[in-house]
């Protein structure tokens, strides 16, 4: 019996995931790698589709390649986050689509065609590539994959030279790490991100023996202690919805990882209320820069 797969966490009332299904989401640490799944090896696949068009078509193409001919594929998403486009995209791959709507989601089910169309094109479009403007390896779907995030850019320009051991929490593809590691006094830099694709790109982009890249959910703990510094541009969206608790969790983990006298450098959107959690955990909190809708803090443990 071929195994079944699931991508993401579809609502249980909208799609029944078989017991033992292999999780393939790059945003769930420890998941399988759909890119490496053998062709025709899955009997069923359920995808909570990502909102980005290129990323969604890439994921569907990977699933169709991994499924056996005739195997069932269910793709669902909120209507306002790509769901309204799923049926058309599946038809473009040569699938006959059965579509339903429930709880603001579009749910499309198909049988994998004998010969799906357009897989190679979708796979090429969604694969890793070097971005000429960034000068770095990147991957559609990761945070700010095709542009320099303005918050990260402002933080990069503001950072002082560091020394000792530190961490880049939510490291992305490694943009801030280059600025941190420019200081020869840095002994070690732990780089952690929840997105496997970002971690893989960061490992390509940061060719420095002092850097160690790890795929993990920072909210579950970093395992780091006694650090001299932490740098971060924490996320504040989860599944597309604003979630201020994400950044607050990052700040708490940074405080746990730092030694007394260690320093946190943080960039955040101006509207985010991080001051209370910062002042409760750090000895001194200093606003350093406020520009272009962002603010930068230095916080002393």
Image: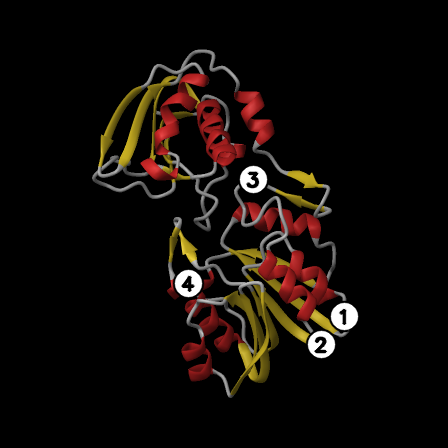
Residue hosting label 2: 163
Badge 3 vs badge 2, beta-carbon distance below 8 Å: no
Q: Position of residue 194 (x, y in %)?
A: 49, 54
Q: Position of residue 57 (x, y in %)?
A: 48, 29
Specify whether residue 246 is in view: yes
Q: Nearer the viewer, residue 132 or 270?
A: 270
Q: Position of residue 52 (x, y in %)?
A: 47, 38
Badge 2 vs badge 1, beta-carbon distance below 8 Å: yes
Instruction: Compute the Cα span from label 3 to label 2.
Output: 33 Å
Residue hosting label 3: 140
Counting residues from the start of the chain, the first of labels 1 and 3 encountered is 3
Q: Residues within 10 Å of mark 4 (few under 14, many from 20)?
A: some
Residue hosting label 1: 183
Residue hosting label 4: 246
Instruction: Compute the Cα span from label 1 to label 3.
Output: 30 Å
Counting residues from the start of the chain, the first of labels 2 and 4 encountered is 2
Which residue is found at the position 35% from the left and 38% from the top?
80
Instruction: Compute the Cα span from label 4 to label 3.
Output: 22 Å
Single out the mark in the foreground, 2 or 4.
4
Q: Residues within 10 Å of mark 2 (few under 14, many from 20)?
A: some
């Amino acid at each position: 019996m071929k195994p079944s797969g699931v991508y993401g966490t579809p609502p249980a009332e909208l799609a029944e995931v078989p017991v033992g299904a292999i999780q393939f989401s790059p945003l769930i640490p420890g998941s399988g790698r759909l890119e490496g799944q053998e062709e025709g090896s899955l009997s069923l696949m359920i995808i909570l589709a990502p909102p980005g068009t290129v990323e969604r078509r890439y994921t569907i193409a990977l699933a169709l390649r991994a499924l056996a001919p005739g195997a069932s594929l269910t793709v669902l998403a909120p209507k306002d986050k790509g769901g309204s486009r799923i049926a058309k995209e599946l038809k473009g791959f040569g699938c006959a689509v059965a579509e339903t709507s429930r709880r603001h989601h579009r749910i499309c089910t198909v049988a994998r065609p004998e010969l799906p169309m357009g897989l190679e094109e979708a796979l090429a479009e969604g694969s890793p590539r070097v971005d000429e403007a960034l000068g770095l390896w990147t991957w559609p779907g990761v945070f700010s994959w095709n542009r320099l995030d303005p918050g990260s850019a402002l933080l990069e320009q503001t950072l002082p030279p560091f020394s000792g051991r530190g961490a880049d929490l939510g490291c992305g593809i490694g943009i801030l790490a280059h600025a941190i590691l420019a200081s020869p006094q840095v002994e070690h830099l732990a780089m952690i991100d929840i997105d496997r694709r970002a971690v893989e790109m960061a490992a390509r982009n940061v060719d420095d023996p002092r850097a160690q890249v790890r795929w993990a959910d920072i909210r579950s703990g970093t395992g780091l202690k006694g650090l001299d510094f932490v740098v971060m541009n924490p996320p504040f969206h989860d599944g597309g919805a604003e979630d201020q608790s994400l950044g607050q969790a990052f700040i708490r983990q940074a405080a746990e990882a730092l030694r007394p006298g260690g320093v946190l450098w943080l960039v955040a959107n101006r509207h985010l209320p991080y001051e209370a959690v910062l002042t409760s955990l750090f000895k001194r909190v200093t606003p350093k820069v406020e520009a272009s809708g962002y603010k930068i803090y230095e916080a002393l443990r």
